[in-house]
Image: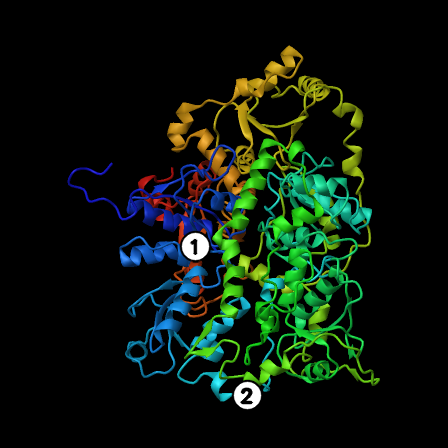
Amino acid sequence: MAGENEKPGLLDGCAIYFVQSKSLSASLISEFSKLVHKHGAQLLEPTKDGKIPLEHATHIVSNTIDFEQYHDALQYMIPVVNSNWIKITLARNKVAQVRPYSPDPRMIFSNVILTCADIPESDKETIIGATMALGGMESKDLTRQTTHICALSMDHEKCQEAQKKNLKCKIVLPHWFDDCFRLGRRISEAPYMLPDPEILRTGPDEDITIPPSEAVEGATSVIPSAAMPGREREKIVVFAQKKVMISQDLPINARLRNILNNLIEQSDGEVVNDVDACDMYVCQYRDGDEYIRAAQQGKDVGNLAWLYYLIVHNEWTRPTRRLLHYPIPRDGIPGFTGMKITLSNYGGDARVYLENLITAAGATYTKTMKADNTHLITARMNGEKCEAAREWNIEIINHLWIEDSYAKCEVQTFSNPRYQHFPPRTNLGEIIGSTFFDEQRLREVYFPGGEEVLSTAAKKRRKANDAANKNVYASNLAETDAGTANKSSPLGGKTASKPPRGTQNKQNIQTPAKTTRTTRGKENDTPSVMSSGSRSAKDKALSKLHQLAPDIALYEKEKKRTAKDGPWGGKRAADQIDRDRAAKESSPAEDGGEEDETEQKRPAKKARVSSSPEMRICLTGYKRWVNDKIREEADRRKLRSMGIQIVQDNVPCDYLAAPRMVRTMKFLRCLARGPEIISSDYVTACVEAGKVLPPKDYLLVDKESEDRFGVTLQTAISRARANRGRLLWGVPIFCTEEIKNGVQSYQTIAEANGAIFRVFRGRGGSVIKPTTPEEDGGAPPDPVYLLTSPSPAEKALWPKFEEMAKKGNMEPRIVVSDWLLDVAMKQELTFDPRYLAVRYFAENPPF
């Protein structure tokens, strides 16, 4: 508590939990944690099983909704905000509202702070009300935090002041809000920005460059077909502590299935064959007893494309967030049979995605358009196909119709105005892939009931999902869409159905009742000029998903490595990996190698000798077997007969057994996986008793070491379970070649925690690419570490490392190895100047 004379902190009463992701790294979390703690906030630790302590949290800071407890947080009404909330709170010296800082993409006006200029009062209320309902916020006055000014001209004093002070806010016509409301999506402001808006000076028929389709990257097909990066990829951590079941209905051969199994296991996950035991179920179709049971129990159910996406991006995402990441209906969506659909004005990944979505829905896709086509899906209301479709009385809609139909598991009516709305200077390909599944509708259609067989945990997950679907984050979007379409438009009193720019298009998109078509033998096979430019080249890429076959030899080799050999060395920087993923392609492996080796090591008979479950124990610091191979072999055989397996530190384990907390390579490497830690006396006790004893009676207790390392053992384990091997995710760590105790041990510890590890020799090879602050977007320099000893040869490298780091716009930190060991032990990324080599060796001179 604050003292009598101490002022309360700005964030007093706030209990904050940070969720790590690629856009919110451990380094950033460390910096933000210091700031909020300084202002009185309480920093929450994960629970014993590595989860968010929802019962204590007042705020969850995350830059994505792709974390497993997001729906649970919504159920408990805990605000989830992005990191900008902290920045604005500290900048204003006032706790900011949470609504504008939601990371949920369905809140299309999140991060929008709006002020209105010369807009009629009634229209102003409509715009402000709808903006706030979709995550935005109103500011009556113009401030430095204002992001948008809604105005009809530059004459208003707010516009002139923004221009005079060179504020970064965007001055847009109300047409932009109108089009966003109609579509239920946020489109680019560029064509609507004053003083020279494109929609008022350019005709709707002029070409528009097809935008990139980042939202469908890795989700263009249910059967992934693009290549993965090779051996230089970062460590995969997305399967850590996960049990994965791969269904037999997937269209993959035994060799690829074996590769996937090996990869999951190498990533600290586990492959199981029991749907009740799994956390993730991967299948092709939405039918079968296993699918229904997994879906009813609230497991993460996805298809092969989803599994590949997790591997490529190394970050968890819900399979229901992207339409082609969920198992497909075997016979399509009812109502789509007989439909013949073609596309216009979409290109690249967007076109491939829509082609596959049409097929998955059960309709027929045609590249060219003839008179017997039933639907034209277009990103703009112009082009040869659009003209022919009007002439032949073919339905013309945008892609939102097919996405909503697939997401809601039924054909949507064409009368919804959002499916027939085409902003004149926008290619709707920019908002493709932003539709989520309606999870309640999925349950009603494909796996209804099941409440009587659900476990308590499954019932809780279902309740959380239902609460989230009813939450404003998911539901107000459709309500705003329907309500805005028939309200008066914020365009000076004119109705929204007839905006002053593009009224000619409204007549073109009216869809009359179906009549008998006039067949003239005419075929339209020419999409719009801008749509066809680079499609053939992009079709070859499809998406940046993995084909794992090229790595089979590497995985088999890795399985045979000993602790002496260590894992693969060196990785590229995270951003370099992302760039290489798009550029590199590997050819399929020709030979599966020793694929059956794993199966041969798992005899079914031994697994059933004992009624107790098999236990995998990693043992370190055990004195009983020192210089006594005969006793070791006898004890190992006895333990195996009881179902206890002593494993190496490079494979997943259930328990880590040690005499005390030690900063050894084996201890710290296993700790990163978050196993239960027991005393090594447990192994001796089981051998002597001849039976499996309760591990909970032998939990490691080491108060002396906890005081020395500044962390309790249980806190370190909880953090490790939350980190899932990502403590140092993306953090570049270099090491001198002549460091004391050798490079290998530090490399193993760093890579076990997700770091990018390199040996620094001061010449060529592993260097940081020169980068200017402008190329980094003006962001502050990220730290880069060099582990070193005090030898003269290593000291000579220090100036070279500093020079390389500064040229790469990074902050050089030359540290002693204790920094890495302490970070790995605490499972928390922190930094203290006492670890700097210059200071440390000055205070502790070597002999």
Q: Which residue is mark 2?
A: 203
Identify which amino acid the numbered label 1 is placed on: Asn
The quadrant holding residue 798 is bottom left
Viewer-proximal residue, 158 or 10?
Answer: 158
* 459 over 210 or under it: above or below: above
Q: Which residue is mark 1?
A: 82
- Residue 287 appears anywhere in the view: yes
Colour scheme: rainbow
Mark 1 vs 2, N-terminal side: 1
Identify which amino acid the numbered label 2 is placed on: Gly
* 415 over 818 or under it: above or below: below
Depth check, mark 1 against mark 2: the one in front is: 2
Viewer-proximal residue, 709 or 560?
Answer: 709
Helix, strand or loop at label 2? It is loop
Residue 772 screen position, x and y as percent: 43, 69
Q: Is residue 600 left or right of residue 843?
A: right
Residue at (60, 14) in percent of width and height: 685
> What's the CA distance linking mark 1 and mark 2?
39 Å
Helix, strand or loop at label 1? It is loop
Residue at (68, 24) in percent of width and height: 613
Residue 812 screen position, x and y as percent: 41, 56
Viewer-proximal residue, 724 or 99?
Answer: 99
The quadrant holding residue 211 is bottom right
- Residue 811 appears anywhere in the view: no
Locate the N terminus and report the quarter of the image it occupies: top left
Locate the C terminus and report the quarter of the image it occupies: top left
